[in-house]
Structure formats: C-alpha cells, structure tokens
Amino acid sequence: MNTPADKAPAQSASARRIARTAVVVLGATGGVGRGVVAAALANGRPVIAVARDKAGLQCLRGKFPDADLSIVPGSVSSDGDGERLARALRKLGRPIGGVVAAVCASNARGRLLDNPAAFLRQTLDDDLLPHLAAARHLLPLLSDAGRSGTYVLIGGPNADRPWAGYGHRSIATAALRMLARVLHEEARTLGVRVQLLAIDSPVSTELNRAHACEQWPSALAVGQRALALMDPDGAQPAEAVVQFSDVKVGALPTVTSNVDWPSSPSTISQEPEEDAVARAAESTSSGPADAGQKPTGEQGLLPARCLQDARTLLRNLISTDNNNQERST
C-alpha cells in the first residue's frame, strides 16, 4: 500500500512532465491571449502562439526574444481552418500538454428584437462555433502518444443575465458554457480534461488599460489561473465550468516589456468601451473581483473616463427632465 510519501515523487514527476510540454494559446495576439502567453512563459512553459494576425505574432515574438516561443499563423473559424491548424501543429513535432482558447468575440451592438434572425446566427458563427472547430481538431493532439492534457476555454461575462444592447453575446456566452460541459464529458474518452474559466467581469488588458477599472482582473491573472487548471498536482476544481475566483494560484510573476503593442481592437471576455461605465459602477459598489482582495488607496474609485461619462449621462438626464417639465407647464 502506497503512503502519501510514496505518492509525492510520482506527482512531482507528473508535474515535471507537464512543464516540459508546450501550451498552445489560441488568439495569442488578443488582449487576454497576450496575458496568457506572458503568464505561461514566466512560468517556464514553452508556448505555441496561434493567431490570424501575422504582424501581431511577430511583435509577440519580439517581446520575448529569449523565450521558448513558437508562432503559428492560423485560424479556427471553421472546421477546415481547424484541420489545417492541427496539421501545422503536428508538423512542429513538439509535445503539447495544454491548450488555452482565448478566441476573440465580436463587438457588434444591437437589440435582438430590432434585428433579423441572421444577426444572432452570425454571432453564434463568430463567437461559439470556432470553439467547437478548435476542440474537434486540437483535442486529439492532447491525447497523442498516450499523453493527457487540459483544454481551457476562456469565457466572458453576462452568461447568467441579459446584457443590455448585447443580448446576442449573452446568449453566445451562455451557449459556450454549455458547450464546455458537453466537451468536458465527451473528452473523457480521450483522456483529456476540458474546462471553461468563467470570468464574470471585463478584463484589464494592455489594450484597455487607460480606462480599465481597479476591480477588473488583469489578463496576466487570467493566464495564471488558466495555467493553474493544467497543474496535475494542484487542488483545483475539476468541474466543467470553473469560476475565476475559485482557482488558486501563487504569486503572479513580474513580466517586463520593452515593446509597444499596436492598438488593435482584438480582445476577449471584455465589454465594449461604451458599456464600461455601467459595469464599473456596479463592480465598484459590490467590491473587488477577487474575494480576498482588499481595497487600498484609490482602489474602488472610478477612473476619470468613467466619471466623465457618468457626469455626461447625468447632465443629459437632467436636461431631458427639465425639458419635459417646461412642456408640461
């Protein structure tokens, strides 16, 4: 009978084996994707960065010139794209221990009742089906040669309640959570674990840092938690959908950068800027995103951009109310 001491070396060996395998990051040039890449490299994991933006991939490689970082231009927009990407990854000849899907979502705005059915269909085509195409062709890579790995999807906010003006994205996000549950069950036959990291707030990235609120988790923190789900020795939740705050991680690494990113709009799990004020106000009143986080100094105050937008909204409301009163008299 093995004792806990007997099991410890085997667990450590498993962790070392996982650490030698590469992490594939889909959407690596997006706001959250960059954070995942930085977190993985800071953790000593080899990274294979995948994105459609070839210039962004070259910029990414320039940011980490001495890191074990491979770049692969590719897409998962369709089954054909997913199949071509899987072939390209196999040609690299590198063992893959995990996949993080930080695929970008669309930012189109509009009420469902004001748009034809094709509007919602297009949202599902853009936001949901690429995840299925990626999983169908990349999950087998994680089980090749008897290896097992973890496939992590990054899920955005507002899956449980409607998002005013973006109801189509709420539907797609809720559908993504169900897709993760289905894949979680079906991937058991491959010896692969599929989990969705659910982030119920916007994410602070290198692309939106100027107007991000203090309560928003950073892209680096998202990457750390995605990697923590891949740790075979970590006591992490095993269910299909895992809340961001439920994942335990150690101290975040310090990541330095001497490269300016292009101001591209690609991002994941992030609200459009025009709706940031409402979400920021709500998150400020409810407290920090992480349960154990304590407000310090200026934390909890809205950024100047949010305050300016809030004042503009109040002025418009007051002006409308005064006009209504004048007409009534």
Image (cartoon, grey):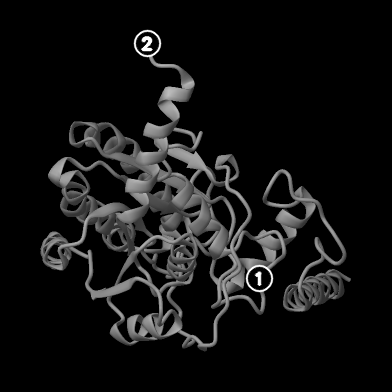
- The image shows residue 192 at horizontal and vertical percentages of 26, 39
How dense is the environment of label 2, judged by Cα within 10 Å: few (below 14), some, or many (20 and up)? few
Q: Mark 1 points at which residue?
A: 212
Identified by mark 1, the residue type is Ala
Of the two numbered discs 2 and 1 on the same chain, state the one appearing first in sequence.
2
Observer-nearest residue: 48 or 187? 48
Q: Residue at point 48% right, 54% down?
A: 156
Image position, residue 42 (x, y; %): 50, 65
Where does the N terminus fall, quadrant-wise? top left
Quadrant of res 88: bottom left
Query: Quadrant of the rendered structure where residue 29 is?
Result: bottom left
Q: Do the residues labelled 2 and 1 touch (CB within 8 Å)?
A: no
- Residue 151 seen anywhere in this rendered image of the structure: no
Which circle marks residue 1 in the picture? 2
Q: Is residue 235 left or right of residue 99?
A: right
Eye-nearest disc, 2 or 1 = 2
Q: Is mark 1 on a helix, strand or loop?
A: loop
